[in-house]
Amino acid sequence: MSTPRLEINLKKISHNLKTLIAFYGAKDISISAVTKVVCGNVAIAQLLVEGGITILADSRIDNLKKMSAAGLRCQFLLLGPPMLSETEMIVKHADISLNSEILVIRKLSESALEQGSIHKIILMVEYGDLREGIMPDDLENITDQVLQLKGIELIGIGTNLACFGGVHPDQEKMGLLSDLATGIEKKFNVHLQLISGGNSANYRWLTNINDSGRVNNLRIGESIFLGCETLKRERIPGLFTDAFTLVSEVTELKSKPSMPYGEMGQNAFGEITEFDDNGVGARAILGMGRQDVLCSGLSPEMKITILGGSSDHMIINPRQSGLKVGSEVRFNLNYAALLSAMTSPYVTKVNT
Ligand SMILES: *Cc1c(COP(=O)(O)O)cnc(C)c1O
C-alpha cells in the first residue's frame, strides 16, 4: 500500500465514542462531536451518527457541506465565530452556529429571512481563556437584541476554555455559566435548551463532581479521536489513543557522520540548526515531510529517534530497530499532527 498513509481504525473511534457517551450521559451531558481535526471525513462522520451523535460540529463550512451531502441524519453546527461575509452559506449549510458578534447575528437573521429558514444560535460567553465570547456583563444586552431578530432562534449559551489561554474549566467557571443561563431565562422568560460548557478539557472537572449544574452539552473532538483529555493530555480510562497511525517508508539507510560538514548557514526553512556530534552511525530517510505532517507531533511506535524534517523527508536515527530500505515505519499522532495529516492531500487515508 502507498505511503505516507494514515490508517484510521474506525472500530477504535466507535469504541471511544461509546465510552464517552456513557460517561457523559451518566452526568446528563450530551456530546456534540467536533469533526474539524478529521476535516469532516465522511466515514468517520457516519460512524459518529450511527453511534448516537445528533449534532456534528465543525469550524469549516466546506466540511459541513461534505458531511451533509452524505445524507447524514443529524444537525450541523458551525463552530465560531462565523464570518460576516459568509452568513448566506452558513444559513444554507449549518443548522446552528456559535456566535459572539451582534453584527454577524443581524446578518445571519437577514440571510435566514431571505432563505425562508430559521437559523439557531448559541451565544458564546468569555470566561477568561480569551478566544471567542461575549463578556458576561454584556450578555443580557446582546440577548435582548437577539430575541428581537426574526429568522434567529436562540437555543443556548456556551463557553470555550483551555483553547487559547489554557484556562481550566472548573466548578467556579461552570457555576458562573449555569447562573448566567438561569438569569437570562428569568429575565427574558425563555428556555435555553443547550448549555454548552466546553470541550475535551472539561473531562477532569466532571470526574470530580456529580452535579454539573445547568451544563448539559459539551463539544468533543480530541477525546473521541485520540482518547485523551486535554488539560494534561492524559489517557481517559478505557479509551484508545491509537485510533490513527501514520505510516511512512524508508527511502535511504546509510552510515553517516552525525555532524553536517562544510560552511554552514540556514537550512531549507531559514532556521539555524544545532547538532550534537555522536560520531558516525546509522541514519535513515523517510519519504514523508512537512508537506504531509507536523513532524514534531509524531511518536514512533518502534524505538527510533526523529532527528528532523524537510518538506518531503524525515531524518531518523534507526537505532536497533532493524529497518531496511523499503521498511514501513509507524507513528502515533498528537492533535496537531493529526490535523496536519488529515489536511494534507499527499497523505492517503485508509479505513481499517
Ligand atoms: C475545536 C473546538 C472544540 C473541540 O475541542 P476538542 O479539544 O477537540 O474537544 C469545541 N469547541 C470549539 C468552539 C472548538 O473550536
Image (cartoon, rainbow, N blue to C red):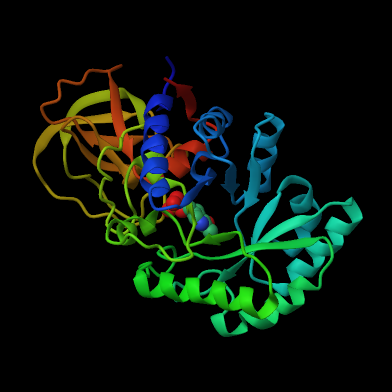
Residue 303: x and y, percent?
Answer: 15, 32
Q: Who is closer to the viewer here, 314 or 151? A: 151
Q: In which quarter of the image is the C terminus?
A: top left
Residue at 11% of width from left, 47% of height from top? 277
Residue 99 in the image: above or below residue 226: below
Question: Is 244 placed left or right of 44 in the picture?
Answer: left
Question: Is 327 placed left or right of 257 in the picture?
Answer: right
Question: Is 103 placed left or right of 184 in the picture?
Answer: right
Residue at 31% of width from left, 59% of height from top? 231
Q: In the orientation shown, which residue stands out farthest toward the top?
A: 1
Residue 191: x and y, percent?
Answer: 64, 65
Residue 127 at least partly seen: no
Question: Is 267 placed left or right of 152 in the picture?
Answer: left
Residue 94 at least partly seen: yes
Q: Quadrant of the N terminus?
A: top left
Residue 246 in the image: above or below residue 231: above
Residue at 63% of width from left, 50% of height from top? 77
Q: Who is closer to the viewer here, 92 or 140? A: 140
Residue 17 in the image: above or below residue 82: above
Q: Who is closer to the viewer here, 329 or 169? A: 169
Residue at 68% of width from left, 83% of height from top? 141
Corner quadrant of residue 56: top right
Q: How many labels does the image show?
A: 0
Residue 192: x and y, percent?
Answer: 62, 64
Corner quadrant of residue 274: bottom left
Residue 150: x and y, percent?
Answer: 84, 65
